[in-house]
Amino acid sequence: MADPQTKAAAATHEKLQQSAAVMKESAVEQVDSADRRTELAADRTILAAERTYAAWVRTGLAALASGIGARALLDKLVADWLSKTAGAALVLFAGFCFVAAVWREMAPSVRPPKPRAQRLPAALLIVINGFLVLVTLAAFIGVVTTP
């Protein structure tokens, strides 16, 4: 028969082994959890960049419409040079917004680590915003040259 101290030492040793196994499993879960949090943070970064892109385009479209509207509404109310200047400034600001939208989306300040979310294709952004810049140039010419 084993003495009580040996039994207590064996029981303690068994508890330590069980505790070590639980700790090892917990450590693996923590690493997996940290990786998942990093992945989710990267996805949030991608989605935030897309919201920023949409905000730039939305602001550009509003400025474009405001520039054309300002030229049309102020035509008979104020001096011709003032309505042309106000309209042209807003239309030029719209062009700046369209260019800034692509620039900000294609050259982010921080690259997120391994996101699951896909970025918008660069070619699509360039084509869409290139078209918007062409519309802006046409509106600018229309605002400035219309008598």
Image (spheres, rainbow, N blue to C red):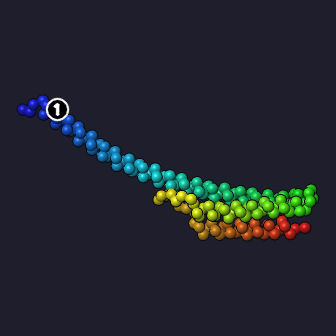
What residue do we see at 66% from left, 67% from top?
128
Which quarter of the image is occupied by the C terminus? bottom right
Q: Quadrant of residue 127?
A: bottom right
Apparent side of residue 13 relative to residue 75 in the rendered image (left or right) = left
Which quarter of the image is occupied by the N terminus? top left
Q: Furthest residue to the top?
A: 4
Above or below 85: residue 4: above
Is residue 68 at all visible to an observer of this figure? no
In depth, the one of 136 and 92 nearer the eye is: 92
What residue do we see at 56% from left, 59% from top?
109
What residue do we see at 68% from left, 69% from top?
130
Q: Secondary structure at mark 1?
A: helix
Of the residues shown, which amino acid type is indicated by label 1? Ala
Apparent side of residue 143 relative to residue 116 in the rendered image (left or right) = right
Q: Quadrant of residue 100?
A: bottom right
What residue do we see at 13% from left, 34% from top?
6
Is residue 143 at all visible to an observer of this figure? yes
Q: Quadrant of residue 51?
A: bottom right
Residue 107: x and y in percent read 58, 63
Residue 144: x and y in percent read 84, 67
Q: Furthest residue to the front?
A: 109
Residue 65: x and y in percent read 78, 59
**Residue highlighted by disc 1:** 8
Residue 91: x and y in percent read 78, 62
Above or below 47: residue 126: below
